[in-house]
Amino acid sequence: MTRKFILIAMVLVVALSIGCRSSILKNVENAPITFKTENKPPMEQIKKAIITAGAGLGWRIASQSPGHLIGTLNLREHTAIVDIKYTIENFSITYNSSTNLNYDGTNIHSNYNGWIQNLEKAIIIQISHI
């Protein structure tokens, strides 16, 4: 009886831990921006490219100040808010806040990093078309 109880308890613990996966939060720091030509476009074009890239993935991106955007993604009951800072040479995506993503100062729901990685790739692709 005791062995059976321990086995059931272990199975439950494993099942619960799989359902509540979390990962170390990863930001995008100073990702380089490259262009098709040597001529660097105006900052406004970079801003538009970032907004377009985010919109294609469901992000709402609003201007905070020159070189600083705020991105918000609402998926089901989850919300992620990020700061997107950019220059003519690079951009960064950093965590701002979230709802229902279990952020504890280090770890966050494992889907968050995928959302950020997808946003980073979309921005790189969109900027490459400038």
Image: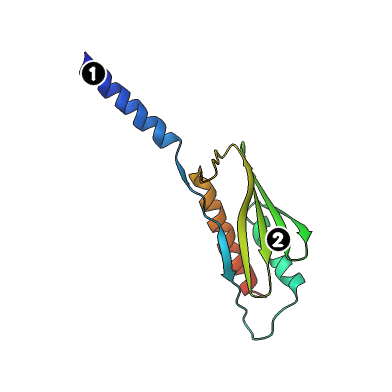
Image coordinates for residue 26, horizontal then vertical, percent: 52, 54
The quadrant where residue 79 appears: top right
Of 7 and 77, nearer the camera is: 7
Question: In which quadrant of the rendered view does residue 105 lie?
Answer: top right
- Measured as percent of width and height from the top left, residue 15 is found at 37, 31
Crowd rating for badge 1 (residues with CA inside 10 Å; few <14, some 14–19, many 20+): few
The amino acid sitting under disc 1 is Lys
Looking at the image, is mark 2 or mark 1 nearer the viewer?
Answer: 1
Q: Residue furthest front?
A: 105
- Give coordinates of residue 49: x percent, y percent: 69, 67
* View extreme (bottom): residue: 38
The Cα–Cα distance between marks 2 and 1, rounded to whole angstroms, is: 55 Å
Residue placed under numbered mark 1 in the picture: 4
Is 7 located above or below residue 120 in the figure? above
Where disc 1 sits, the SS reads helix
**Mark 2 neighbour class, 10 Å CA radius: few under 14, some 14 to 19, many 20 or more:** many
Residue 51 is marked as 2
For the point 61% across and 63% down, the residue is 92
The residue drawn where x is 22% and y is 15% is 2
- For the residue pair 65 and 58, the one nearer the viewer reads as 65
- Disc on the earlier residue, 2 or 1: 1
> Quick check: can you spot residue 69?
yes
Q: Residue at x 77, y 65 (%)?
A: 66
**Image position of 26 (left or right of 59):** left
Q: Which mark is residue 117?
A: none
Residue in the picture at 68% in, 71% down: 87
